[in-house]
Amino acid sequence: MAVPHISPAKAKELIDRGAILVDIREFDEHSRRRIPTARHAPLSTLDRIETTAGAPAVIFHCRSGNRTASNAARLAQCTDFDAFILDGGIDAWKSAGLPVIEDKGQPIEIMRQVQIAAGSLVLAGTALGAFVHPGFYFLAAFVGAGLVFAGVSGSCAMARLLAFAPWNRRAANVAAA
C-alpha cells in the first residue's frame, strides 16, 4: 500500500486540524530530539495506533523519512485513518522552522555510538598494526567481522553492550521514571 509523503507545512496544517503525529524512532533517538506534539510509538514495538474520533489522519515520522518510507505498508496497517509520511522526517520539520524539543543532556543515539566505537577500534587496530605489531590488525578484522555479522543477522552485539554503558543506563532510568 502506498502511503503519501507530505511536507512539514502540510503536516502542521493537518495537526492543527486534529491529525495525530507519531514518532516511530527508538527511545534513544526520541529522548534527545522530538517534536512536542508527537506521540512516541517505536517501530520495534509498534502494533496499533489508537486515535480519537474526528482525527483526520495519522502522520508518521522518523529522523530523515527513510525509515518511515521503507516501512510504509506496515505503518498504514497500524491505523484505520488516512496515513501519511512526514517527508524528510524531524530533520525537515526542524529545517522548516517548526518547534523541536532538544535535550543535549541525553546521550547520542546507540547506532551513532556503535559507529564511533567501531570506527575508533578499526582505526586503532590499523595504526597499531602498522606501527607497533602486525598482530593488532586482528582487532580491525574482528570489528569488521562483527559489523558484517550485525548486518546479516540484524543483531548488533556492540549496540547491546553500549546499552549497558553508564550514560545510556542513566538515560533509560530517567525515561522509566
Image (cartoon, rainbow, N blue to C red):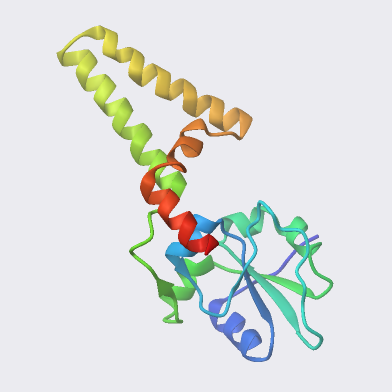
Residue shown at 76%/62% (left/top)? 2
On the image, the x and y values in percent for residue 11 come to 61, 80
Can residue 64 be seen at all in this image of the molecule?
no
Residue shown at 37%/46% (left/top)? 166
Judge left or right: residue 87 versus residue 54.
left
Residue shown at 51%/62% (left/top)? 175
* Vertical position of residue 143 compared to residue 66: above or below: above
Residue 33 occupies quadrant: bottom left
* Vertical position of residue 21 compared to residue 71: above or below: below
Quadrant of the rendering where the N terminus is positioned: bottom right
* Vertical position of residue 113 compared to residue 124: above or below: below
Identity of the residue furthest to the bottom in this view: 17
On the image, the x and y values in percent for residue 32 come to 42, 63
Judge left or right: residue 123 versus residue 41.
left
Residue 144 occupies quadrant: top left
Q: How many marks?
A: 0
On the image, the x and y values in percent for residue 99 come to 45, 81
Can residue 13 be seen at all in this image of the molecule?
yes
Residue 40 occupies quadrant: bottom right
Identity of the residue furthest to the left in this view: 131
Residue shown at 46%/45% (left/top)? 111
Identity of the residue furthest to the front in this view: 177
Judge left or right: residue 171 versus residue 124.
right
Front residue (pair 160, 70)? 160
Front residue (pair 95, 31)? 31
Judge left or right: residue 18 versus residue 100.
right
